[in-house]
Image (cartoon, rainbow, N blue to C red):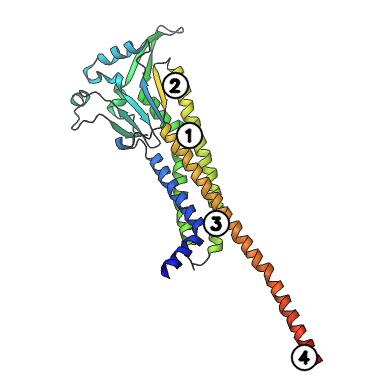
Amino acid sequence: MVAISMIWFFTKRMPRIFALAFNLISIFLLIFLLIGCYNPSNQSTFLVKYKFDDNSPFYTIIEKSYEKSNTTLGLEEVIIRSGYMGVCIDNIPSQYSSYNNMTTFSNSICYARKNLSSVPLYRDLEIQLSNIASSSSKTQSSVVLNILKLAQLTSVNVIHPYVLMATVILTILMFLFILYVTVPKLPFKLAVNKFLLLLSSTIVLTWGIGAMWTHVGINASYRLVPSSSMNIITVKKGKKAAVMAWFSFAFLLLDSVVLWLIFLRDRKSLKDEIDNVPCAQNRYNNYSSDSSTLHSKV
């Protein structure tokens, strides 16, 4: 009997359980997307990957620029990944740690997105391509390229994490509210259900803008950086991050649709119950009148 009651309980609340499942999947996707490139273990979830193009005619100039000092030898092979919360530098030369007095060496290292200008690699990766004489004066100005600065600009100025952070917080709140209305015999369920409709629609709109912003930022870097760097730097789009962004949006949209369908179903059931009340009352009145007529005849 208990098993039947449990089956009936879950069957009756299956739409809300689906909403909880969609919401939970969205939370995990959004959190993993947010912490991408925050540490080396999560650097596979990157938005954009930068590296020097070894087929570029300028590649030999870059090699010679890094060969001028033992501290920068081999840095032309580094791979830099930009994420929402940080920037990861991979394929760092093994001798770099010894020349920079690093106590521990790792082939990969990640930094917070706003703390890059103070690290030694930021200065060491800066290369001077050529000196160009100014037409207005006899002084020469150098053309400087910093691949790590490009990655920092992507994370700080192009793709911001704030919309994603707000979406994560709101999605967690929505999960708690859905859990609240799923538990039976709790007060204020009607008000919470109405609030859930507003909250779910807001989240879908917010992360819809965020996902499109991410898509545009990734593609802008992919198209602009190689051309603006004279094809010295190649750019690869983070397909995993893009898929996670759009899949999380899809699950949030499904969540909102399920909540709206539940609300409309409940409204229809309530309307049917209200419509049936006068009918029952009329039948009762008819029976009462028939009974009184019968008694009068008797």
- Decide: few, some or many residues near mark 3? Use Cα within 10 Å; few <14, some 14-19, many ≥20: some
- Decide: few, some or many residues near mark 1? Use Cα within 10 Å; few <14, some 14-19, many ≥20: many
Q: Earlier in the sequence, mark 1 or mark 4?
A: 1
Query: Distance from label 2 to label 3 (Cα)?
Result: 44 Å
Answer yes or no: is residue 85 visible: yes
- Decide: few, some or many residues near mark 4? Use Cα within 10 Å; few <14, some 14-19, many ≥20: few
Circles 2, 3 touching at the beta carbon (< 8 Å)? no
Q: Earlier in the sequence, mark 3 or mark 1?
A: 3
Q: Secondary structure at mark 3?
A: helix
Residue visible at 71% across and 72% down in the picture: 279
Q: Earlier in the sequence, mark 3 or mark 4?
A: 3
Mark linked to residue 41: none
Answer yes or no: is residue 183 visible: no
Identify the residue position indicated by label 4 in the image. Answer: 295
Identify the residue position indicated by label 2 in the image. Answer: 225
Identify the residue position indicated by label 3 in the image. Answer: 195
Of the two numbered discs 3 and 4 in the rendering, the one whose residue sits closer to the viewer: 4
Q: Amino acid at mark 2?
A: Val
**Nearest to the observer: residue 19 or residue 127:** 19
Quarter of the image for residue 225 reads top left
Residue 181 image position (x, y, % from top left): 50, 61
Query: Distance from label 2 to label 4 (Cα)?
Result: 96 Å
- Decide: few, some or many residues near mark 2? Use Cα within 10 Å; few <14, some 14-19, many ≥20: some
Q: Earlier in the sequence, mark 1 or mark 2?
A: 1
